[in-house]
């Protein structure tokens, strides 16, 4: 079962459209990298919070596999994002101390809150993000190679290579879980997905405003 997040389909956002056609300024992309790092680095903790609040072991196993993908080894996903950010001019110390704006902080607050609200809400929020990532990672990867980053810089592009594949599996696993939900749980998951997707959309709004003011 798929949840409907088309109202907040991030691929349709003007910020991503300008990224895709290469008209997005490098300065705005650099700011985006630092802002979004705050979400990427918090994402494993969203998963941990969800895992600890769900009784069903099969669902916990799905989250555990996801969490391992996020955090295992030197090439954990926050580290891969740091490599991308480095190609745009950031160093690790700058990323770690960067103060994100309110829209990004709202993403974190929303995901942490929904992670604890109920299993249905937690998985709905996760789906709002991971269901869109494979296609988003695909277009970002191609646009970055075409307009912004040397295609031979594999390290800087690896975050997107990984996510265009891995999140396809995560998306399918969540859709399988939703099949066993009651109607009330499906409704709650849908509501949560919309709330999380809107928080992500609002963050892109803030990046678009920054671009337009440049």
Image (tube, rainbow, N blue to C red):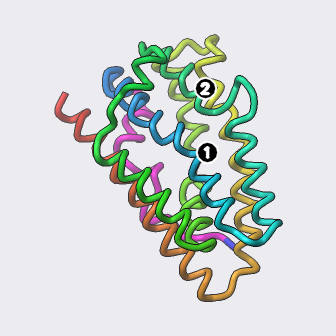
Is 135 left or right of 66, judged from the image as shown? Answer: left
Q: How far is disc 1 from disc 2 in space, using C-alphas?
A: 12 Å
Whole-percent x and y of residue 52? 67, 61
Where does the magenta region start and end?
A: 2-23
Whole-percent x and y of residue 147? 46, 20
Whole-percent x and y of residue 152? 64, 11
Q: Main secondary structure of the magenta part?
A: helix
Q: Secondary structure at mark 2?
A: helix
Whether label 1 touches label 2, CB < 8 Å: no
Q: Residue at x 60, y 57 (%)?
A: 49
Q: Residue at x 58, y 73 (%)?
A: 118
Q: Work out whether 60 lies above or below 108.
A: below
Q: Nearer the viewer, residue 27 or 66?
A: 66
Among numbered discs 1 and 2, the one appearing first in the sequence: 1
Q: Is residue 16 magenta?
A: yes
Q: How many marks?
A: 2
Q: Identify the residue position indicated by label 2 in the image.
A: 79
Q: Quadrant of the N terminus?
A: bottom right
The residue carrying pointer 2 sits among few (fewer than 14), some (14 to 19) or many (20 or more) residues within 10 Å by Cα, namely some
Q: Residue at x 59, y 87 (%)?
A: 184
Is 121 left or right of 18, judged from the image as shown? Answer: right
| Residue 123 in view | yes
Q: Work out whether 125 lies above or below 75.
A: below
Q: Secondary structure at mark 1?
A: helix
Asked where in the image residue 190 lies, by quadrant, the reply is bottom right
Is 185 left or right of 181, judged from the image as shown? Answer: left
Q: Identify the residue position indicated by label 1 in the image.
A: 44
Q: Quadrant of the C terminus?
A: top left
């Amino acid at each position: 079962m798929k949840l409907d997040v088309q109202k907040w389909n991030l691929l349709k956002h003007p910020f991503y459209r300008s990224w895709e056609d290469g008209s997005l300024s490098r300065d705005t992309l650099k700011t985006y990298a630092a802002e979004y790092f705050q979400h990427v680095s918090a994402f494993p903790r969203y998963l941990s919070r969800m895992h600890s609040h769900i009784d069903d072991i099969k669902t916990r196993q799905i989250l555990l596999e996801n969490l391992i993908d996020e955090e295992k080894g030197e090439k954990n996903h926050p580290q891969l994002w740091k490599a991308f950010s480095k190609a745009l001019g950031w160093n690790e110390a700058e990323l770690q101390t960067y103060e994100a704006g309110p829209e990004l902080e709202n993403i974190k607050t929303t995901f942490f809150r929904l992670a604890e609200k109920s299993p249905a809400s937690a998985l709905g929020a996760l789906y709002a993000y991971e269901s869109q990532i494979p296609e988003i990672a695909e277009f970002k990867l191609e646009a970055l190679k075409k307009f912004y980053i040397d295609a031979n810089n594999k390290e800087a592009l690896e975050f997107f290579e990984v996510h265009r594949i891995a999140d396809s599996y995560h998306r399918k696993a969540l859709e399988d879980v939703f099949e066993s939900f009651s109607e009330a749980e499906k409704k709650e998951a849908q509501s949560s997905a919309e709330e999380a997707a809107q928080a992500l959309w609002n963050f892109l709004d803030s990046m678009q405003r920054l671009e337009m003011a440049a």
